[in-house]
């Protein structure tokens, strides 16, 4: 049953992608609550003396209780000492700056709560990346007395200090006052990134060096967006390996060597573990938790990473970083650690177009215009104007083919029994007239990189999150003009207006450019192009109903502008009578063939001659 399910989903995905590409080809060419501006600029506070604060924990038992110590050592060996300290009663320590608040638990020494101060979910709840046990960090290690222990079950002693505005939290899992395993957190003002290190001191004779400790990091991603299935589409595990290569995992498991960072991206928010010295090996696993939009409404995916930690001279010594913050291209890119690859901007040329063209240009427009919706419209206008020469070339080619259609029909009738001769004479006509059926397709193919880049850009643009425009309350999610009392498969339980407008505009544009001559150009054995003309807008309507309304706004505006450009080209710029006269004039002139055309024609003539000999 599982294999069948996967096959059906693959077929549906293929049909949707095919519809999008066909549309691109025929087109010739997913409440504002964030009131605080985000900045990665570090504010340098006034220098002050280092201050040490140890969280107060009420101690109800004496730390020198020999009976308690003996009992703990029977269970935990040398680490039984940690259970005689005040921190063994539990509790948390809070560190925070103007962007982020973290609560670190004594038990396990890991973050039990991570909240972003400046953001809310779709239903106005604070954004938590970690809460209520949805994440864990554990080191499994062996001791020289044959025990296997897990740090998540042991108690760390906290010590919080402040130095020049930086908060430093030391969590120590102690064997004695001078022997311990330490998690060290350092938080700076104005940053989502904090330093993190795992070090041991004096444990050479305690840790079993023949068994490699293993670090396990797990996180179950909370839902933050209006559509959990749409959010889940952009929820992935991303990792960098071999210094600069990166890969992603949306389901299943994988492993890689020399891993520099591991990111659990939850669409617009990301948790990242970075290391100064690449991990020699890391194992990854991702489980999808969303099968039904109506039932699975809390979590998106479960992420798990398992990392062997090599001992160095019998001790642990790893310098790392944690990042808990938005999946914002500018913020991540400013760290200069290839974290921009976490944003799904597209591979190859599509990603380059987004990074070096659309992202900086959109940032400029959104900075000078009063709303993000107007910035989208302005960028659309500029893109269409830049691509208008390509549109002109395409329409000119269509005009030439339309004028030559009667003569091509004559050739088809004259040589209906000789396909090779018909092809040869048709090519001669094209050559003399300076026309080519391919010249209309090439401009459309040239525009595909731009369209696909924007298809990746808008669903990944963090700036659009919870920004309203007209009837859309969030340009990063779908707009709603009507709620349905039932759910339509693949469409959803709501009606979005922007996709409807975009689909209507696409249909009108296709009617203008291909509708009139579509049936006349129909070739035997080829798909019914008129059917595809009706199918493509329908696919777009269904597909975009759950996509970002900013993307639908772009396509709607783009097609409106393209329709306007086509009308200007048709009625103002291009004169079909002049084109016809020029074609007739070109046909009278001797046409110098290039080497390729000449060689191809010779091959056709040789083939025709061979065919005649075979008939004789």
Image: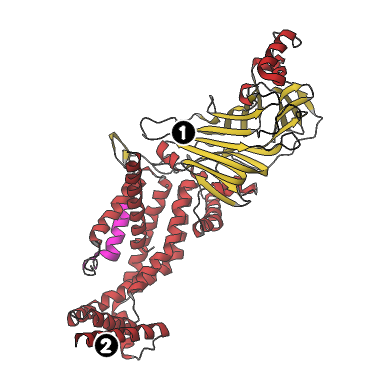
**Badge 1: how crowded within 10 Å, few (<14), some, or many (20+)?**
many
Say if 150 sits above or below 452 in the image. above
Rounded to the nearest angstrom, the CA distance separating label 2 from label 1 is 70 Å
Q: Nearer the viewer, residue 388 or 171?
A: 171
Find the residue positioned furthest to the right: 49
Q: Quadrant of the C terminus?
A: bottom left
The relative height of residue 138 versus residue 253 in the rendered view (above or below) is above
Q: Is residue 364 visible?
A: yes
Q: Which element type, helix, strand or loop, lies under badge 1? A: loop
Q: Is residue 103 above or below residue 406?
A: above
State which tag comes first along the sequence, 2 or 1. 1
> Would residue 499 be visible to someone looking at this image?
no
Residue 503 is one of the magenta-drawn residues: yes
Q: Secondary structure at mark 2?
A: helix
**Main SS of residues in magenta:** helix
Q: Is residue 340 magenta?
A: no
**Residue drawn 23% across the image and 79% down it:** 419
What is the magenta range? 501-519
Q: In the depicted view, which residue is nearer to us: 7 or 478? A: 7
Instruction: Where is residue 129? Give x, y as percent.
Output: 54, 32
The N terminus is located in which quarter?
A: top left
Q: Which disc, if any, is residue 223?
A: 1
**Label 2 sits on residue:** 609
Q: Quadrant of residue 292?
A: top left
Q: Nearer the viewer, mark 2 or mark 1?
A: 2
597, above or below 549, in the image: below
**Residue 196 locus on image (x, y percent):** 68, 35
**Residue 64: quadrant of the picture:** top right
Image label count: 2
Taking the image as shown, residue 145 lies to the left or right of residue 602, namely right
x%, y% of residue 484?
A: 29, 35
């Amino acid at each position: 049953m599982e294999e069948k399910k996967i096959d059906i989903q693959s077929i549906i995905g293929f049909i949707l992608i095919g519809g999008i590409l066909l549309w691109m080809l025929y087109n010739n060419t997913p409440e504002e609550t964030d009131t605080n501006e985000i900045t990665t600029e570090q504010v340098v506070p006034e220098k002050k003396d280092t201050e040490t604060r140890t969280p107060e924990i009420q101690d109800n038992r004496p730390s020198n209780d020999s009976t308690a110590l003996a009992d703990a050592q029977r269970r935990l060996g040398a680490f039984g000492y940690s259970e005689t300290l005040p921190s063994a009663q539990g509790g948390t320590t809070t560190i925070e700056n103007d962007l982020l608040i973290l609560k670190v638990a004594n038990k396990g020494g890991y973050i039990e709560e991570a909240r972003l101060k400046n953001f809310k979910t779709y239903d106005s709840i604070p954004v938590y990346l970690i809460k209520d046990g949805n994440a864990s960090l554990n080191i499994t290690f062996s001791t020289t007395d044959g025990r296997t222990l897990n740090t998540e079950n042991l108690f760390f002693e906290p010590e919080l200090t402040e130095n020049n505005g930086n908060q430093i939290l030391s969590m120590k899992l102690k064997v004695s006052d001078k022997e311990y395993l330490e998690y060290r957190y350092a938080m700076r003002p104005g940053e989502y990134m904090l330093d993190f290190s795992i070090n041991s001191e004096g444990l050479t004779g305690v840790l079993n060096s023949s068994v490699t400790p293993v670090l396990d990091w797990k996180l179950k991603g909370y839902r933050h967006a209006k559509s959990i299935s749409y959010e889940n589409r952009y929820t992935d595990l991303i990792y960098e390996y071999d210094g600069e290569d990166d890969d992603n995992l949306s389901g299943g498991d994988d492993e890689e060597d020399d891993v520099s960072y591991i990111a659990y991206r939850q669409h617009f928010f990301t948790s990242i573990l970075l290391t100064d010295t690449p991990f020699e090996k890391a194992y990854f696993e991702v489980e999808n938790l969303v099968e039904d939009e109506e039932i699975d409404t809390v979590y998106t995916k479960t992420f798990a990473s398992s990392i062997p930690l090599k001992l160095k001279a019998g001790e642990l010594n790893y310098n790392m970083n944690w990042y808990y913050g938005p999946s914002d291209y500018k913020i991540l890119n400013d760290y200069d650690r290839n974290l921009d690859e976490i944003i799904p901007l597209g591979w190859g040329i599509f990603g380059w177009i987004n990074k070096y063209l659309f992202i900086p240009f959109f940032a400029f427009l959104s900075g000078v215009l009063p709303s993000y919706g107007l910035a989208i419209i302005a960028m659309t206008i500029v893109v269409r104007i830049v691509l208008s020469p390509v549109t002109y070339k395409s329409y000119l080619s269509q005009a030439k083919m339309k004028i030559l259609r009667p003569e091509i029909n004559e050739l088809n009738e004259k040589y209906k029994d000789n396909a090779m001769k018909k092809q040869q004479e048709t090519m001669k006509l094209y050559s003399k007239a300076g026309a080519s059926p391919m010249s209309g397709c090439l401009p459309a193919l040239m525009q595909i990189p731009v369209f696909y880049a924007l298809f990746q850009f808008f669903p990944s643009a963090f700036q659009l999150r919870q920004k309203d425009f007209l009837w859309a309350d969030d340009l990063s999610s779908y707009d709603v003009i009507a709620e349905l009392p039932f759910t339509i498969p693949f469409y959803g339980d709501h009606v979005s207006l922007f996709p409807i407008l975009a689909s209507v505009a696409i249909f009108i544009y296709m009617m203008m450019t291909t509708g009139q001559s579509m049936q006349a150009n129909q070739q035997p054995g080829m798909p019914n192009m008129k059917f595809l003309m009706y199918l493509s807008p329908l696919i777009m309507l269904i597909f975009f109903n759950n996509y970002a309304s900013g993307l639908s706004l772009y396509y709607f505006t783009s097609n409106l502008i393209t329709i306007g450009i086509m009308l200007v080209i048709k009625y103002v710029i291009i004169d079909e009578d002049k084109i016809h006269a020029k074609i007739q004039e070109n046909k009278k002139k001797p046409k110098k063939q290039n080497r390729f055309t000449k060689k191809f024609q010779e091959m056709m003539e040789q083939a025709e001659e061979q065919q005649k000999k075979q008939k004789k």
